[in-house]
Amino acid sequence: MSYNQKMFGLGSKRSIIREIFEYSKMRSAEIGADKVFDFSLGNPSVPAPAEVNATIKELLDTQSSVLLHGYSSAQGDAGVRGVISDSIKSRFCVDMSPNLIYMTCGAAASLSICLKAVIEEDKGDECIVFAPFFTEYRVFVENAGGKLVISKPVDKTLEADVKDLESRINEKTKAIIVNSPNNPSGVVYSEETIKALCALLETKEKEYGHDIYLIADEPYRELVYTNVNVPYLMNYYKNTLVCYSYSKSLSLPGERIGYIAVNPEMNDASNIYLAVCGAGRSLGYVCAPSLFQQVIARCIDAKVDIEIYRENRDLLYNNLTEYGYECVKPDGAFYLFVKALEEDAYKFYERAKAHEILVVPCDDFGVSGYVRIAYCTDKARVLGALPAFKALAEEYGK
Amino acid sequence: MSYNQKMFGLGSKRSIIREIFEYSKMRSAEIGADKVFDFSLGNPSVPAPAEVNATIKELLDTQSSVLLHGYSSAQGDAGVRGVISDSIKSRFCVDMSPNLIYMTCGAAASLSICLKAVIEEDKGDECIVFAPFFTEYRVFVENAGGKLVISKPVDKTLEADVKDLESRINEKTKAIIVNSPNNPSGVVYSEETIKALCALLETKEKEYGHDIYLIADEPYRELVYTNVNVPYLMNYYKNTLVCYSYSKSLSLPGERIGYIAVNPEMNDASNIYLAVCGAGRSLGYVCAPSLFQQVIARCIDAKVDIEIYRENRDLLYNNLTEYGYECVKPDGAFYLFVKALEEDAYKFYERAKAHEILVVPCDDFGVSGYVRIAYCTDKARVLGALPAFKALAEEYGK
């Protein structure tokens, strides 16, 4: 066994989501896909806006193949970065520059690159995440040579708990990841929380005499269903890096396109940007896919129809709470985070499965006793599942 | 300065190719692009085959947006992997399986992932490359925690030198990268060389009691101009990983699409495949771009027109040798590796620049005293440059 055992571990450990995926396929073949209420995958169920495919065709018809499919510069096409920079300027009143935008192969790449750019592995750097958190954060932090530290949420609301955060920050803290709207809870952190969090980080930066980077993981920014404000973190904290992806906002998760934006107000902004470029190079990212870079620039204001998600959210939230489930009403993303009806979320998942309901037990997300319902699915599946959810609750005496 | 200084170094060190790129743009603005003979970039100058754009349009017209642009599984769409596996079977008589194909975001990703999968950083693993070699190998090996070791080529022919390799192998050797057709020399290693190399590796595996992985970096496999055979390394050595990219063979370098193939004859093939999956996950690669995966499956036998490259090669090789330059006639890729007319390749590059010729001095490629001419350009540029090459040679008394 002379290969890398850690990588083997990462590749062979079957994630629960993957396990459910395989079960769902098998079970659908047995009883019919319409009878399996699979809510496990965060794969958008809404098509990309019509502009996307129309733009691809127009690009194919009007641009030279050599330019269109050719390498862009490593940080991304200058024109594309200009469009994104202008959009950030006008939407969030940040004095963004194209020279602080780095195009990436989606959110996972954005995060991996940012973490690699700021974490110094030989110094024992730590990165704090707020539970519940997307499980892959652990993989990305560890690949960058950092240690993952989990901050517990406020009970009931599942907001970031700034007091808990304070107890976990120490001189080794190099970065904090904020993911709002949140996967898996759908919670949007309030402006009050963000302000308290940023004030704490500023205090701690002074106390320890070094920068602490706030990494905003924002693939769900555009998926918000209430009149709630999603604070743009650069407006609250100067050492902010924004990781964006068009996976959810344009329903293009397979095309791997997103960006990193470095706050122009950051200490050493241009040097951090160079570290981002270096980290991208180090991880083998030559450039973000060229065709889709051009698509993004031309569809920057396009939107997917989120009414379908909103309807599903309302149907599930209203009915499940009526049946006796406890959950936080999500303001954004397409997840409902539901308290399991017994202590062990895995056992609850198994009992739900007997009702043909497939949800994800969330112990790996840093909060035990919860399951995630991904409602990025058609309404028929939600409607079909409601009686099963009801029966399941009744089984628990609700 | 609390960010990662190594990443900052990687991002801020201006590569010579980048430097030339900027100079070329500036100079073109001054005297006109047709008067600047820029041979610095390895960006294909031949359009993608017509099938590519036609296939994209057909996919957009016939497939659901949600499926077409959605996530594929991490290792790539099963159908696509099946097509590639069948192609490898029929072309190279290898008993390939779709379950040993891992789709990637191009050759740099393929290499980064393979190296991360096999190198164990805590063991001081080493990876040997044959000079001249693509400079980014150093970055990828070091990111995986390995040490790069350079093996010197056979004088004049620039073939891999198996005797030199033998002197560099030791018990820490974990991997060897073979890049044939070679960037920057265009040399195709002979079957004789490959056989000797593989025999040596087998002996050394036994001697040290552990596997040594042969990583075949093959983006130029389809770009061959003579009747020469490019040995498929899996047929010669069982512990072989093939890194492939469609960047050059289909002129799609910006779309970042390629694959890793694990030899089914390998010790622990399926475990190594899992380590590859884990390494991809660790580096932030969620899946290879979905649309282009489907394009590849439908255009698997499409070919770019390499006659333009062949013509350029012949024009340059025949005339430059007549003017007194020394170079190996390249069998493949789109590079001519020319001995500088003075010892210092950088000084020679500067004097060529005075004739408006832009070539890349290759000291970073592990062989001093050479420059690389990338002839993936239109014929007019080659014809325009010939008098300048002649004048330059005459200046050196040729």
Image: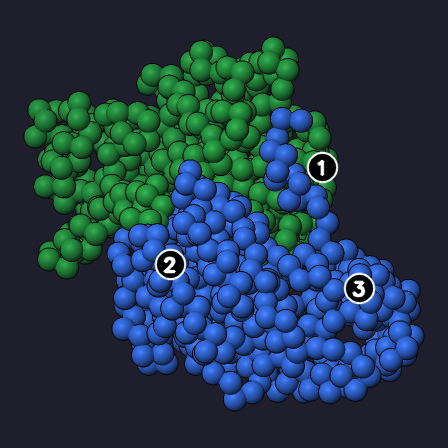
Chain colours: A green, B blue
Instruction: Name the residue at 66% across, 41% down.
Output: B9
Query: To which quarter of the image does residue A6 belong?
Result: top left
Label 1 belongs to which residue? A270
Give residue A307's position: percent from left, percent from top.
41, 45
Which residue type carries mark 3?
Glu
Q: CA distance from mark 1 to mark 2?
A: 47 Å
Q: Is residue B93 left or right of residue B9?
A: left
Residue under mark 3: which chain is it in? B
Residue under mark 1: which chain is it in? A
Q: CA distance from mark 1 to mark 3?
A: 37 Å
Which residue type carries mark 1?
Ser
Is residue A90 visible in the rendered structure shown here?
Answer: no
Which residue type carries mark 2?
Lys
**Local secondary structure at mark 1:** helix
Asked if residue B260 is positioned above or below residue B170 in the image, the reply reads: below
Label 2 belongs to which residue? B204
Quadrant assignment for the C terminus of chain A: top left
Badge 1: residue crowd in 10 Å (few <14, some 14–19, many ≥20): some
Give residue A50's position: percent from left, percent from top.
50, 60
Give residue A38's position: percent from left, percent from top.
23, 47
Q: Earlier in the sequence, mark 2 or mark 3?
A: 2
Instruction: Name the residue at 31% across, 74% down.
Output: B94
Q: CA distance from mark 2 to mark 3?
A: 37 Å
Quick one: A144 or A131, which is closer to the camera? A144
Task: Answer whether labels 1 and 3 touch (C-beta < 8 Å).
Answer: no
Q: How many marks?
A: 3
**Local secondary structure at mark 2:** helix
Give residue B226's position: percent from left, percent from top.
56, 87
Label 3 belongs to which residue? B343
Q: Which mark is residue B202?
A: none
